[in-house]
Amino acid sequence: MKQVMQESLLIKLPVIIGDLFILNLSWIFALTLYPQPAYIAHSLEIFACLNICFIPGLSWFGVVLSSRIVPYEEIIRRVFYVVLCHLGFYTLIQTVWSYGLLPLHLIGTFYIALTVMLMLWRYICRVVVKITRGHGRNTRHVVIIGSKDNALEVYHEMGDNTSTGYRVVGFFSNHEDRPLPDTPRLGTVEDALPWLQDHRVDEVYCCLSTDRYGEEIFPIMDLCENNFIRFFYVPNLRNYMKRAMNLELLGNVPILYIREEPLRQASNRFIKRAFDIVVSSVFLCTAFPFVYIFVAIGTKLTSKGPVFFIQERSGENGQTFGCIKFRSMRVNDDADRLQATKDDPRKTKFGDFLRRSSIDELPQFINVLKGDMSLVGPRPHMLQHTEQYSKLINKYMVRHLIKPGITGWAQVTGYRGETHELSQMEGRVRRDIWYLENWSLLLDIRIIFKTMLNALKQDENAY
């Protein structure tokens, strides 16, 4: 265990030193482009402040480059979080700083340079780690106990990719029907205990069924615990559960649950709700009155009826709420039953413009302020569609575990507008579920920007 910690530190320490170097280099670069005599004169104080503000982000979001299997998206995500954390602390300090707030162009250049260089640096570090492990350095010697499907999958994750640094020494199994390829069978499960006592390995992956805990698994686990061998149990869930599982304790009882939902945490719900309130309040108090006057005039001149159209839709936990939109169609009896189509005769010319520009959705900021909706989330469907698709699409109702949004991940990844085929709705549901499993404030901001870009480009599915 001590060796593992030392190896991890050997990887993390150069990365952290490089991070701090890049932090200071980014500030020098920004100050070189936009010289500020007042800040140059107090450069030591500023450098000290910059480095101190970097510590919380590194502590909270860490360096994952030493992990055996790390997606590059996770590296990028952590860089964003570290930079945002630094921005938050540095801005807080600036508000009480005697030199005042830094110029926007200076601070913007600094953070852009910092983000780009940190991503490049950590990417290079990860490549170096993988190459090093591929050449046999920083390895973990592993034994697998069991040769069923889950053991085979564990082996392929380790043995097919030498850059992870795993070296599978062999496996123990009572059956020879599915041996692990290119890996020696070291004996039966009963032979594992004496073999592990006489041979040195780093990790044991036990893939035996749970009904063998008392007679076989516990003795192996105890041996590992007493001999500095890391023990991992691989449950045989993959035949019927093709997804990641999560573990938590209910008192002293271990419980597996299907998905991680960031918005189950009160702190994350607070952050999302605060963001919704601030953005919706600012929009409703500034731009919305002018939008309303423009839309009201255009609507009244082109058709009879109210400016707003309120439709009952499915919200969080299946509750019904009144979704507010600018009316884009003539008043008709099919409004609550039929989706709008590309050449829908019910639309007015002005209404068609509202839909293509997404202006018709803007009153939903009122829903956001009321708490019925969020800025970002699964788009709310008509009640009839909810009832229909819940019977046709597996896990359809999962998307209702969070508040619906004005825009969503599905809408900015090609699943906006009319659904001609069931597969289109299935694709939308998959993306909605992915969103609730991977929520972050940064993801919300990214979706909002993509939505604005799509609106400017006149999305062809907006009708």
Image (cartoon, rainbow, N blue to C red):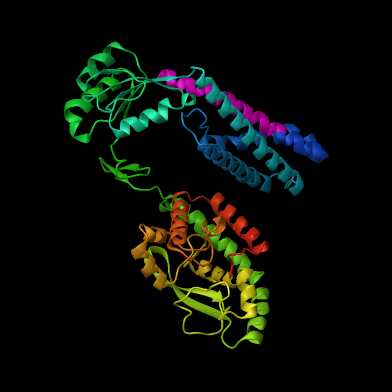
Which image quarter is the C terminus in? bottom right
Work out which residue is located at the far left of the displayed protein and give it: 215
Work out which residue is located at the far bottom of the displayed protein and give it: 304
- The number of discs equals 0
Q: Is residue 359 above or below residue 423?
A: below
Residue 440 visible somewhere in the drawing? yes
x and y percentages locating residue 98 in the rendered image: 72, 44
x and y percentages locating residue 13 in the rendered image: 56, 24
Residue 98 visible somewhere in the drawing? no
Q: Is residue 440 above or below residue 306?
A: above
Q: Residue at x 71, y 45 (%)?
A: 108
Q: Is residue 69 above or below residue 268?
A: above
Q: Is residue 56 left or right of residue 181?
A: right
Q: Is residue 239 left or right of residue 161?
A: left
The residue nearer to you, when weighing 186 against 198, is: 186
Q: Is residue 276 above or below residue 341?
A: above
Q: Residue at x 51, y 23 (%)?
A: 9
Residue span colored magenta: 1-25
Q: Is residue 257 left or right of residue 54?
A: left
Q: Residue at x 51, y 70 (%)?
A: 367
Which image quarter is the N terminus in? top left
Instruction: Using the rendered view, name the quadrant where residue 170 is placed.
Output: top left
The residue nearer to you, when weighing 314 against 345, is: 345
Q: Is residue 110 magenta?
A: no
The residue nearer to you, when weighing 378 against 32, is: 378
Q: Residue at x 65, y 46 (%)?
A: 91
Prevailing secondary structure of the magenta residues = helix
Instruction: Using the rendered view, name the quadrant where residue 153 is placed.
Output: top left
x and y percentages locating residue 205 in the rendered image: 32, 27
Q: Is residue 21 magenta?
A: yes
The residue nearer to you, when weighing 268 against 328, is: 328
x and y percentages locating residue 302 in the rendered image: 64, 85
